[in-house]
């Protein structure tokens, strides 16, 4: 009976108007990197990504994670991706899965890590791997791409925790269907999921919106149509995972990550043109996005 009342209450709640993010808010969130920092104090992220033929997703997310300031990154991927990953992101540590085509299992010891990003290029056959991470890990976690598609088919896996979900419109619609929400209104679905499941939903789009468990909605006014390109979402996953590893709260990591991703995309569009942009160009312009915030902080 209580569950019915709670569900009815959530369905009757109307999304509040989103609040636009701005540079001053980012300046308050961004932390000054300590002068005595070393890789051991700047966080160790774990990225679970890449199936056969999808190593590029893992590569983009991995580089974005390191470019966001994480001290170390371990990439859990299949053995067939080993050479590609060690050549494209030599700074990453590899943990190779026993699966030949897709990931089969989780890393047993999660104690070295401060955050987990899971899903880019993972494939929807990796359900056992996803479920084992969700059951074992209490770490802050970003769920993206195929992790979201598997969640849509297995909604019981999502516990009430501060996960960060980063769906685009199609993934949000599949989640809505899987979780029994009204898929006619994606914003209402994202709002209900954030509140009911106590997670953060980053609904990617023309102006990405961040739905928080406290019922607030934040909108990023930055970004452009050139970012509608393969791999752009993998870059965002890497950025947020890297920020979480450094100790940012899930709310802070989602907000700052979305802003950095969008502003870097705007710099890329200005330099490359929207038609010619690639996801990797967003990573290339992350330094400018960080510097823009640092100027406000007078660094």
Image (cartoon, grey):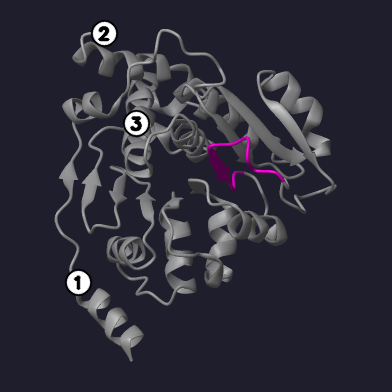
Q: Residue furthest bottom?
A: 1
Asked if residue 220 shows in the view, the reply is yes
Q: Residue at x 83, y 37 (%)?
A: 80
Q: Secondary structure at mark 3?
A: helix
Would you say the residues marked 3 and 1 are in contact, meaning their CB atoms lie under 8 Å apart?
A: no
Between discs 3 and 2, the one toward the N terminus: 3
Between discs 2 and 1, the one toward the N terminus: 1
The percent position of residue 199, horizontal first and vertical second, equals 39, 57
Which numbered marker is on residue 299? Answer: 2
Between discs 3 and 1, the one toward the N terminus: 1
Q: Closer to us: mark 2 or mark 1?
A: 2
Which numbered marker is on residue 262? Answer: 3
Q: How crowded is the residue under tag 2: few (<14 C-alpha within 10 Å), some, or many (20+)?
A: few
In the picture shown, does residue 61 fall above or below 174? above
| Quadrant of residue 195 within the rendered picture | bottom left
Q: Residue at x 27, y 85 (%)?
A: 5
Q: Secondary structure at mark 1?
A: loop
Asked if residue 167 shows in the view, the reply is no
Does 50 sit left or right of 182 as displayed? Answer: right
- Segment colored magenta: 109-120
Q: Which residue is mark 1?
A: 13
Q: Residue at x 37, y 71 (%)?
A: 183
Q: Residue at x 29, y 80 (%)?
A: 6
Q: How crowded is the residue under tag 3: few (<14 C-alpha within 10 Å), some, or many (20+)?
A: many
């Amino acid at each position: 009976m209580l569950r019915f009342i709670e569900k009815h209450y959530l369905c009757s709640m109307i999304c509040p108007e989103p609040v636009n993010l701005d540079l001053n808010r980012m300046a308050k969130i961004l932390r000054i990197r300590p002068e005595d920092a070393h890789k051991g104090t700047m966080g160790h992220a774990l990225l679970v990504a890449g199936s056969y033929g999808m190593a590029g997703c893992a590569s983009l997310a991995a580089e974005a994670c390191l470019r966001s300031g994480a001290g170390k990154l371990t990439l859990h991927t299949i053995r067939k991706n080993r050479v590609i990953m060690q050549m494209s992101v030599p700074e990453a540590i590899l943990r190779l899965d026993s699966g030949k085509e897709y990931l089969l299992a989780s890393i047993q010891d999660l104690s070295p890590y401060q955050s987990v990003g899971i899903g880019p290029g993972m494939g929807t056959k990796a359900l056992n791997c996803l479920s084992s991470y969700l059951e074992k890990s209490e770490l802050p976690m970003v769920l993206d791409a195929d992790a979201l598609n598997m969640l849509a088919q297995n909604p019981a896996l999502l516990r009430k925790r501060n996960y960060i979900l980063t769906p685009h419109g199609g993934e949000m619609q599949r989640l809505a269907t899987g979780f029994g929400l009204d898929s006619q209104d994606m914003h209402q679905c994202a709002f209900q999921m954030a509140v009911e499941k106590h997670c953060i939903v980053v609904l990617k789009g023309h102006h990405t919106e961040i739905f928080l468990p406290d019922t607030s909605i934040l909108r990023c006014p930055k970004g452009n149509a050139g970012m509608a390109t393969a791999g752009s979402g993998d870059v965002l996953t890497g950025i947020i995972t890297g920020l979480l590893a450094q100790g940012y709260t899930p709310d802070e990591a989602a907000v700052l990550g979305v802003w950095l991703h969008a502003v870097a995309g705007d710099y890329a569009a200005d330099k490359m043109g929207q038609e010619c942009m690639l996801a990797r160009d967003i990573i290339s312009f992350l330094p400018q996005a960080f510097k823009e915030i640092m100027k406000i902080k007078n660094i």
